[in-house]
Image (spheres, grey):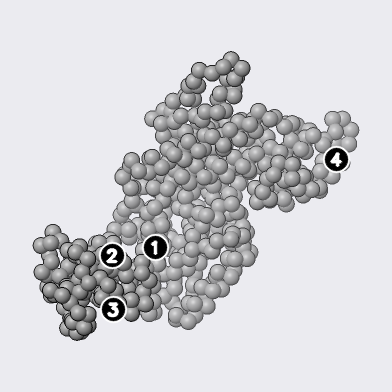
Amino acid sequence: MASSGPASAPASPGWLGTDDRRKKEPEVFQTVSEGLKKLYKTKLLPLEESYKFHEFHSPALEDADFDNKPMVLLVGQYSTGKTSFIRYLLEQDFPGMRIGPEPTTDSFIAVMHGNTEGVIPGNALVVDPKKPFRKLNAFGNWFAERVDRIILLFDAHKLDISDEFSEVIKALKNHEDKIRVVLNKADQIETQQLMRVYGALMWSLGKIVNTPEVIRVYIGSFWSHPLLIPDNRKLFEAEEQDLFKDIQSLPRNAALRKLNDLIKRARLAKVHAYIISSLKKEMPSVFGKENKKKELIGSLGDIYKRIEREHQISPGDFPNLKKMQDQLQAQDLTKFQPLKPKLLEAVDDMLANDIASLMVLVRQEETQRPNPVVKGGAFDGTLDGPFGHGYGEGAGEGIDEAEWVVARDKPAYDEIFYTLSPVNGKVTGANAKKEMVKSKLPNTVLGKIWKLADIDKDGMLDDEEFALANHLIKVKLEGHELPSELPAHLVPPSKRKISE
């Protein structure tokens, strides 16, 4: 599992130096995790340490941060159903859980898989090198950087966003791609009110979360109690399945997430280095240090703009101005390091070359490994059997019936069939098309229906295949999705030997 060293350089003319060869050829690694560790320690960490990145932004990364399993951060104001949501997913109590109003926001609980149930005290957890919590400290964005998904939980029955929660959401800047929103307890209000609440939530989030993309909001009631108002049951089921699929995709995308987060961190570290070295350059060596420090902190916004112009850096890559100014108050600017080009070149080399080779390795790992799926609890509850989402509906209608479900409407379809001039009991594709386009469905959809219905693949439809095509058109017009392959119960009885 250990990574190999840098790729050996081919023979080259004497005028091409070793450093130039190394920059041309990225590192070669066995696994994405090992690659991320080595790149961080050899190319990014030296830059962070030189410019006190860890004192300003985020503690140094450790092996556990690259090796840990995917994590989901659940955030919400008190009494929005956070504990009930977790219990709903697990379908069992977990050690330390307590359901009920508890307006405390100074602690967190990490629910992890284990062979035996138990509670690990926080003091023990943060010193365990195998767990990714060792560097927990006062940095509020610590979790956002290290988790794979951030779920913001809201209560549809009493939607309000406190100033404190608003600040928490704003602290998730640059991690908007990880955020999902759950509008919980949606069964407690009528449909019309639910629409208004949804709109109000989107409007409120739009003012807090500065992102061009609309955040995905899942609507439902995530606990094991009967629905108070069951009118939107199908909507809740569909939303729940979408949320489950999103969570279940996390293991497969974990390596890509860690790679993406390292890129974000590297970009911030570069900007931070430019800021720190600029401040160092402006500081006098002997007299007037305090006055100059005050002046520089006050004009930090202008320094940001100058760095942005000189190094072609996006404004979004800069740290929060007010927070940076506050942090600088306690620093001795004379002890800052001047600009060290070699440290920055190493990070640029990592971003330009090594990350690209790791991206290829990410794709290889994804294709070579079986797709890991989150299992257990609520994730297994509706996978199979009659309570799976959409069971017995749409293309699944008639799945448990002995009679072919299409036969119910076949007499009506037969009347149309015999008006299309069948020859030897079959209508041509051209004649069938004239009838099928009356549905006004796009050609792409009708083409898929044709492939599903033309079971013997002879380019024509007999009366059963024609009836099946019309049944699938009806399924689509009623708002259901078409199957990728024809389910066994929809195959006409006379064609079941062909399909086998």
Q: Cβ–Cβ below 8 Å for labels 2 and 1?
A: no
- The residue at which mark 3 appears reads as 435
Q: Tell me the quadrant of the picture where the C terminus can be found.
A: bottom left
Q: Position of residue 46 (x, y in %)?
A: 61, 30
Comparing labels 2 and 1, the label whose residue is closer to the camera? 2
Q: Is residue 450 above or below residue 306?
A: below
Which image quadrant for residue 50? top right
Which residue is depicted at the point 39% across and 52% down? 249
Circles 4, 3 touching at the beta carbon (< 8 Å)? no
Give residue 278's position: percent from left, percent from top: 76, 38
* Residue 355 position (above or below residue 424): above
How far is the residue under mark 4 from the one under mark 2?
Answer: 70 Å
What amino acid does circle 4 point to? Lys
- Frontmost residue, 209 versus 442: 442
Q: Earlier in the sequence, mark 4 or mark 2?
A: 4
Q: Is residue 167 left or right of residue 30?
A: right
Left or right of 129? Residue 409 is left
Q: Secondary structure at mark 1?
A: helix
| Residue identifier under label 2 | 483
Answer with mark 3 or mark 1, whichever residue precedes in sequence: 1
The residue that mark 1 highlights is: 242
Which sits in the foreground, 164 or 324?
Answer: 324
- Can residue 125 be seen? no
Q: Which mark is residue 292?
A: 4
- Percent position of residue 436, x then y: 30, 76
Name the N-terminal-most of marks 4 and 3. 4
Q: Are marks 4 and 1 in contact (CB under 8 Å)?
A: no
Does dot 4 land on a helix, a strand or a loop? helix
Mark 2 burial class by Cα count in 10 Å: few <14, some 14-19, many 20+: some
Choose top left, top right, bottom left or bottom right for residue 203: bottom right
State which tag comes first along the sequence, 3 or 2: 3
